[in-house]
Image: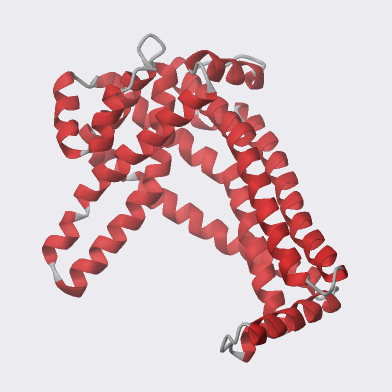
Amino acid sequence: MTNFQVYKKTLSFSLVGFLVDLLSLLLFAGCIIGGFFIGNAINDKGIIGLVVGLLVGIVALVLIKLFVSNVLKAGQIAMMTQGVTEGKLPDNVLHEGRKAVKERFASITAFFLVTRLIKGAFRQIGRTINKIGTAVGGDTGNAITSAIDTGIQILVGFLCDCCLGWVFYRKNVKTSTAACEGAAIFFRNGKTLIRNIGRIFGMGFIFLVIIGGGLFGIFYGISTMFPNLYNSLSKELIETFTRIEYNYESWMVDPKNLMLIVSGVFAIMLWAMIHNVFIRPFILTGVLKNFTAAGIKNMPTEEDFATLNKKSTKFAKLSAVNS
């Protein structure tokens, strides 16, 4: 199967995930707006109600992320891995993906433990690369370090997904062992795999400008239809800042600026969802194919594990986990 065929076949996970995220966003917005109006109706405590609604919305988002979105994502990675390594996929990928997650991880706790340790190990390994910039010294060295760190942090997300894919590929070994192998694959083939950073950054930036800009315009247009809402919010902020004696700037409470801020926040949130649905999975398919091919060609050894144990305490902990 080609990368595009694997991407197209597994896109159903992303579409379902997008629907879940969209409903989550609506729920989040509903909690905030509902909290504001309820609080405003109770002795003009709109700001307090807004904060309470915000907290309730955050809790709801976290729960949905943990128990729905992450399982869908893991199932998609499992099917992508099968597609790029076996060259075929079952008809009902949604069912088989969920089945693969359930079979590979005895519990959701084991899943989160392994993925958390994977991320920690990659971040620690990535910090050793930052020493390149630090060695230069001065402002130039700091700029290099910052650029490398930004690239590494973005790449870490893809590498963690690739590592998770390797866990699904290596069905006959412990999840902890397979995760360690995944980290070792990156360490051994880092130069080749890091070349994907350019494609990740380039495609991400282009679609941010095109899609994000369009969404911002749409949300701002919607915001202008409800001027009273922003006038009330501005009034509440002024009263709150005055009460706590906060020395605020006038632009911070201007209704038009509040429209811009709110529109920007929701545009970024929705763009992130769209990016995760259509753009990121396509990039991940290519990166995952390169990652697994590198691992299959040159399987990690105990010597690789020993080397990484010295470089990362998180990796050492991961290698000691029994799942």
Residue 11: where, in percent of width, then height? 62, 32
Look at the picture and state if 237 lies above or below 193.
below
Residue 125: where, in percent of width, then height? 24, 42
Q: Is residue 298 visible?
A: yes
Residue that protrudes farthest toward the right in the picture:
41
Please tell me which residue lies in front, 9 or 260: 260
Q: In the rendered image, which quarter contains the C terminus?
A: top left
Please tell me which residue lies in front, 160 or 250: 250
Which colour style is shown?
A: secondary structure
Please tell me which residue lies in front, 140 or 25: 25
Task: Name the residue at 72% across, 53% down.
Answer: 28
Q: Quadrant of residue 220?
A: bottom right
Task: Name the residue at 49% across, 18% down.
Answer: 105
Look at the picture and state if 191 lies above or below 264.
above
Q: Quadrant of residue 221?
A: bottom right
Task: Name the residue at 68% across, 37% down.
Answer: 15
Residue 61: where, in percent of width, then height? 65, 46
Please tell me which residue lies in front, 187 or 213: 187
Is residue 151 found left or right of 229 in the rendered image?
left
Q: Is residue 294 visible?
A: no
Count the numbered circles shown: 0
Task: Name the residue at 19% across, 33% down.
Answer: 308
Look at the picture and state if 322 lies above or below 59.
above
Residue 77: where, in percent of width, then height? 51, 28
Is residue 253 found left or right of 124 in the rendered image?
right
